[in-house]
């Protein structure tokens, strides 16, 4: 068998899979932050175009992918499914390890799978500019690319610590014609308030979301675009799981475990959800999310309603959370430093249909180094958590176990992180229980959903 399983362009999925109709337990509704009643769709119209609001709440199992989106997808999709034989040999495992390679996209990650449709739907709805946040920069890069494809302006608020750690992401974003600010910034009221209270604030994804949402809400020509968490974002990402499912069928493999790194949940959710109907019908496949010990949302967070941002501007979502006021340590996996997770993913974890495991960053970088030395490619720090989980699963695996992980992005703009790792300067963080308890104190008490 060849190491690479390739789909012809004609076999690329032309519909996204919507898991909402198939969830055994219905998703808890998003709530108005003031009334604590379910959100009326009109409330979202200030920052999202109507097609995305409809997708967020759609009861339809399959959503057609517009031809204009398919046309941009064809720049890199379908992506390869690769057998990691040299990694298997290095571990000495009896398992078979595959990875779905999303690093081949124009932005070097899975993020354009949703940035392209989000830009398209905003374009046809009359939006002129999109504002967004970004952690490690992959999402900002992806949205700036998508906006350029559809002739939209783009403003990116990048978490300050990542802005400083990863300057080349900013260059790439500006090269796409977008504007980028380190968050907290002096461009928004909330950013200025935060800087006045703490000029050295390192930022967080929740804070950057607050700035981007404020920007969109106060400018009539601007909408907000989110790179993870929400249902429509995960919907778009199911193109990866759908392709993987078809590629495994071509070679006659059935996965025993599907693995993805988890920050906001779109990467992991989009990968596993197309396999959910089979799991509910009796397939023994496991869904395993890999997250950092420094931001252990699924493994140690509370499952309850919380805001998606620090300024409490967003609707309340029921999710595993460390508290919207959580400021994570400055680990290099910036895309995994979010206080909450996608409600769909959290629903599955709460129902025992998905599981999570947390890793220290030095262990993740060690796994990345082994992957580089065997498979030849340098993973993003976020992706390295999924590799660490795959290696753990493979070490004592029985003969023939099939492990498939999502290679969500490359690490070619993360060289400073690798330099710190190779120099022995990378520190491990385990977020203290008392800090989690303190951050959770400010959550609203909601018991009726």
Image (spheres, rainbow, N blue to C red):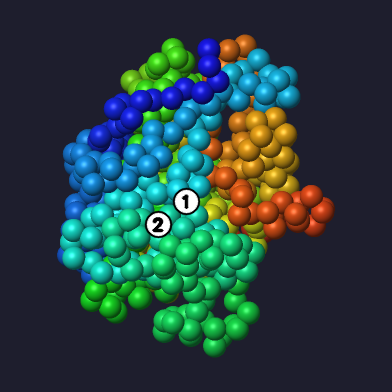
Return the residue at label 2.
Answer: 145
Residue 417 appears left or right of 406:
right
Q: Do the residues labelled 1 and 2 touch (CB within 8 Å)?
A: yes
Give me the disc on residue 107: 1
Residue at 54%, 65% in the rendered image:
171
Up-down: is 94 above or below 105?
above
Q: Which residue lies furthest to the right in this view?
A: 424
- Residue 388 is drawn in which quadrant? top right
Residue 62 seen anywhere in this rendered image of the structure = yes
Up-down: is 146 above or below 369?
below
Q: Label 2, secondary structure: give it.
A: helix
Q: Label 1, secondary structure: give it.
A: loop
- Which of pointers 1 and 2 lies earlier in the amino acid sequence? 1
Q: Position of residue 193 (x, y in %)?
A: 48, 85
Depth order, front residue of 418/326: 418
* Disc 2 packing (10 Å; few <14; some 14–19; many ≥20): many
- Number of numbered tags placed on the structure image: 2
């Amino acid at each position: 068998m060849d190491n690479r399983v390739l789909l012809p362009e004609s076999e690329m999925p032309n519909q996204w899979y919507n898991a909402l109709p198939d969830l055994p337990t219905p998703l808890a509704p998003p709530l108005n932050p003031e009334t604590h009643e379910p959100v009326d769709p009109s409330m979202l119209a200030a920052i999202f175009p109507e097609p995305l609001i409809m997708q967020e709440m759609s009861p339809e199992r399959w959503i057609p992918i517009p031809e204009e989106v398919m046309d941009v997808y064809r720049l890199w999709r379908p992506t390869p499914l690769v057998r990691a034989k040299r990694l298997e040999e290095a571990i000495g495992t009896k398992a078979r390890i595959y990875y779905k390679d999303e690093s081949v996209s124009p932005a070097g990650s899975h993020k354009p799978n949703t940035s392209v449709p989000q830009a398209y739907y905003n374009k046809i709805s009359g939006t002129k500019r999109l504002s967004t946040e970004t952690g490690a920069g992959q999402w900002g890069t992806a949205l700036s690319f998508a906006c350029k494809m559809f002739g939209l302006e783009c403003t990116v608020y990048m978490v300050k610590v990542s802005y400083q750690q990863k300057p080349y992401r900013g260059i790439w974003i500006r090269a796409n014609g977008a504007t980028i600010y380190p968050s907290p910034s002096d461009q928004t009221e909330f950013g200025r308030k935060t800087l006045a209270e703490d000029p050295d604030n390192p930022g967080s994804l929740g804070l950057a979301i607050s700035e981007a949402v404020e920007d969109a809400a106060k400018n009539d020509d601007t909408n907000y675009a989110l790179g993870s968490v929400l249902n429509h974002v995960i919907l778009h990402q199911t193109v990866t799981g759908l392709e993987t499912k078809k590629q495994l069928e071509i070679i006659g493999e059935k996965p025993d475990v599907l693995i993805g790194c988890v920050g906001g949940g779109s990467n992991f959710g989009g990968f596993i959800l197309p396999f959910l109907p089979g799991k509910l019908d009796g397939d023994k496949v496991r869904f395993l999310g890999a997250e950092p010990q420094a931001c252990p949302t699924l493994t140690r967070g509370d499952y309850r309603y919380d805001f998606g941002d620090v300024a409490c501007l967003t609707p309340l979502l029921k999710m595993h959370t460390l508290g919207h006021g959580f400021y994570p340590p400055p680990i290099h996996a910036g895309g995994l430093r979010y206080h909450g997770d996608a409600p769909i993913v959290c629903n599955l974890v709460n129902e025992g249909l998905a599981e999570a495991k947390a890793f220290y960053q030095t262990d993740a970088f060690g796994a990345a180094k082994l992957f580089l030395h065997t498979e030849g490619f340098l993973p993003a720090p976020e992706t390295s958590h999924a590799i660490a989980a795959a290696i753990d699963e493979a070490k004592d695996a029985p003969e023939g176990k099939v492990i498939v992980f999502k290679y969500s992005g490359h690490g070619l703009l993360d060289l400073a992180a690798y330099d710190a790792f190779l120099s022995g300067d990378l520190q491990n963080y385990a977020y203290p229980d008392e800090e989690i308890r303190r951050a959770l104190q400010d959550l609203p008490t909601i018991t009726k959903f």
